[in-house]
Image (cartoon, rainbow, N blue to C red):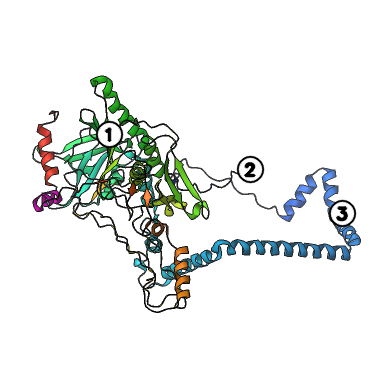
Amino acid sequence: SPPPPPPAKRSGPKLRLAPARRSQPEPSLRGPSFSLPPLPTSPSAAEIRARLAAAPAEIRQAALHAPGKLRSGLADAIAVFNPGVFAAGFASAIIAVAATTTVIANEATAFLSEGGRGEVLERALLFGAILGDVKEAYVDGQAVDLDELFDTGVNAMLATLDPYTTYEDASHAEDLSTRTSGRYGGIGITIGADESDPTGSPSVLVLSALEGYAYDAGVRPGDRIVRVDGLPIGGKPVDEVKTMLRGTPGTEVALSLQRDGAAQGQAVELLVQRREVRLPDVSLSTLLAPGTGYVKLDGFSEGTAEELAVALLRLFETERVTGERVESLVLDLRDNPGGLLDAAVGVAQLLVPKGTDIVSTEGRVYGEGATLNYRSIHPPLVPASTRLVVLVNGNTASAAEIVTGVVQDTDRGVVVGEKTFGKGLVQVVEPLPGGRSLKLTVAKYFTPSGRCIQAISYAKPQKALTKATQPSGSPAPTADPAVPPGATPGVPITNQGGRQSAPAGLRPPHDAGLPSPPVLAAAGPDDTGGGGDAEARRRADAFLRSRETFTERSMRAGEVFTTANGREVKTGGGIAPDVQVSAKPVGVLERSLLRQGAFFRFAGLWLPGHEGTPR
C-alpha cells in the first residue's frame, strides 16, 4: 500500500479554513425482518462415542492413538529443553524491552521539554480535571453545561491575547467560512429583528434581497417573514431563522410574508429555491461623470480580485461605446472591514506596477527574524495614466488598509478621507475536531515603506523587569491600553450569509457608536526621572528595546517613513489620508430617523408603486 501523505504544514498568513463538516444521517434501524441462525452446541460424550463407532476405521484408530502421541510429544520437548538457553533468551528479551522502554521514555521527555510542550500538557490535564470535578460535584447539576463551560473558558483565555484570536464552535466556524469564501447555500436575503412591529412582538424583517436569487422569486425589502416551511417564527431569534433559511442548493423553502400594501391579513406565499449564493464584494460600479469611474468595494473574500477586474473591464469598455476615455478612477473603501490577505494582494496587483512590493508580514510562524514578502507579479489592469483616488474612513480596516497603504507608499494614487482603523494583524484559521476552529493571530504586516499600521499594542507588561533593574522614579512598563470597538446601536442585523450588514436607511451614522480609531498610549521608562543608577537605567532601556513590539518599533518618535517619491508619510496607527476630508456631521433629527429605520421603511412603502421608474 502507498505510504500515508505527510501531515499538512502551516501555510503562513494564508487563511486556512476548516471544510464544512456535514453531519451524516444515522443509518435506519428499521428494515426487513430477519433472524440469526442458531449457534452450534458442543456434543456430549455419548454423542462423541456414537459418532466414533459409526466413523471409518482410520478415523477411529487416529482418535484412539491421539492421547499417546500428545504425551510422547511433551516428553520429547522436555528432553531437549535447555534451562541455560531459556534463561539467556529470557534475559535478552528483558534487556531489549528495557532498552526500548528507555529510548521511548527519553524521546517522550525530549518531546515534552521542547517548546514547553510538557507545560501545555500539564495545564490541559488540569483544565480537564477541573471540568470533571465541576461535572461530578457541582451543587446544581442542571446548571452544568460542559460545552458552555469549555467555550467560555477557552475564549476567556484567548481574550487576554487580543480581540481577534478566538475559538469558534461548529456554527461560528461555518459562518467564518461563509464570510471568507463569500459563498453559502441559501436564498440570498439579509434579515434583521424588527422591534417596532405593529403586532407588538419582535418580527424578522427582510432588509435586502439579492437580484438573481430571492429578489427574482418575489421577495422584497421590507417584507416580514411570518412562517418558514409552514412553521411560525414569531419570537424566534434571527440566527435560528437564518439556519432555517439555509440549506442544500437545489432544495426549496416555502415563505409566508407580510407585506405593507397587501390586502389586510393576506400573506404573500412564495416558494423559493435554495442556490449557492455568491456574496458580491463590488456593490456598485458606474461612471460618476464623463471620464470618471467609481467602484464601491465592501469586503475581501475569495474571488474579490476577479470580481473587481470584471467591474473595471466594464468601466473601460465604455470607452469604445461612448468614446469617453476613463481618465480617473475612484476606489471607495469606506466602511470596508477587510478580509483575506490573499484577496488584498490580488486587488493591489490590479492597481500598482508589476514588481511592486505590496506588503510584508513578520511573525514567529515563519521563524525568528524571518519575513514573508508579497510582490506584484502581473501588469496592472488600471493603466498608469489613469488617476487613482482611494476613499477611506475610520471603519476602513485590515485588508482594505493593505491596499490603501500600497497605493500611498508607491505614490500610485491619492488617499482621501479620514484616518483608517489601524488593524495590522494577520490571523490563520486552524481546523479542530468536530468542525470547530481556532482563529489565531500569527503575524503583523507592514506597508512597503516599513510602517506597521496596527494602532493598539497588545504586548504584556515585562515581568522580567524587576525592581533591581528598573530605573528609580520611572513608571513600570505597561501594555498599551486597548479600546474595544463599540457596539453598533439600533436593530440587530445578521446577513443570511454571515456578514454584518445593513442598508443605508438602517445603518447608524458614522459618529453614532461605530468603532473609532483607538489611541496608542505607550508607556516606558522616563529618562528624566529623578535619581537612580545610570547603569541600571541603561540596562533597563536596552531590555525594553530588545522586547519592543512591532507596533512600538514602527511608531518610535523621530522615525521617518517616506514614499517611493520621497514624500513623508505619517505614522501613529492606521493610514493617515493625503487629503483630510471629514464626514458630514449628522444632526439630531437625522440620527433619530436613522436609528428608527425611517428611511428604510419609507423606501419600502415607495418602491411597490414605482418599480421600474428610471433614476
Predominant secondary structure, magenta span: helix
Mark found first going from the N terminus, 2 or 1? 2
Helix or strand or loop: what does disc 2 sit on? Answer: loop
> Mark 1 and mark 3: span between their CA atoms?
101 Å
- Disc 3 crowd rating (10 Å Cα; few below 14, some 14-19, many 20+) is few
Quarter of the figure with the C terminus: top left
Q: Residue furthest right?
A: 79
Residue 329 image label: 1
Q: Which residues are magenta?
A: 587-596
Question: In front here: 586 or 298?
Answer: 586
- Rendering coords of residue 29 (x, y %): 45, 46
Residue 268, image quadrant = top left
Mark closest to the chain's N terminus, 3 or 2: 2
The kind of residue on which mark 1 rests is Leu
Residue placed farthest to the bottom in the image?
A: 531
* Lateral position of residue 273 relative to residue 259, left or right: right
Q: Nearer the viewer, mark 1 or mark 3?
A: 1
Q: Is residue 431 left or right of residue 252?
A: right
| Callout 1 crowding tier (Cα within 10 Å): few <14, some 14–19, many ≥20 | many
Q: Which type of secondary structure does the marked residue at label 1 adopt?
A: strand
Residue 209, percent from left and from top: 23, 37
- Residue name at image x 25 percent, y 20 percent: 321
Q: Amino acid at mark 2?
A: Pro
The amino acid beneath tag 3 is Lys
Name the residue carrying label 2: 3
Q: Position of residue 423 (x, y in %)?
A: 34, 52
Task: Name the residue: 41% across, 66% down.
Answer: 460
Residue occupied by mark 3: 69
Q: Residue furthest front?
A: 566
Instruction: Point out the frontmost of discs 2 and 1.
Output: 1
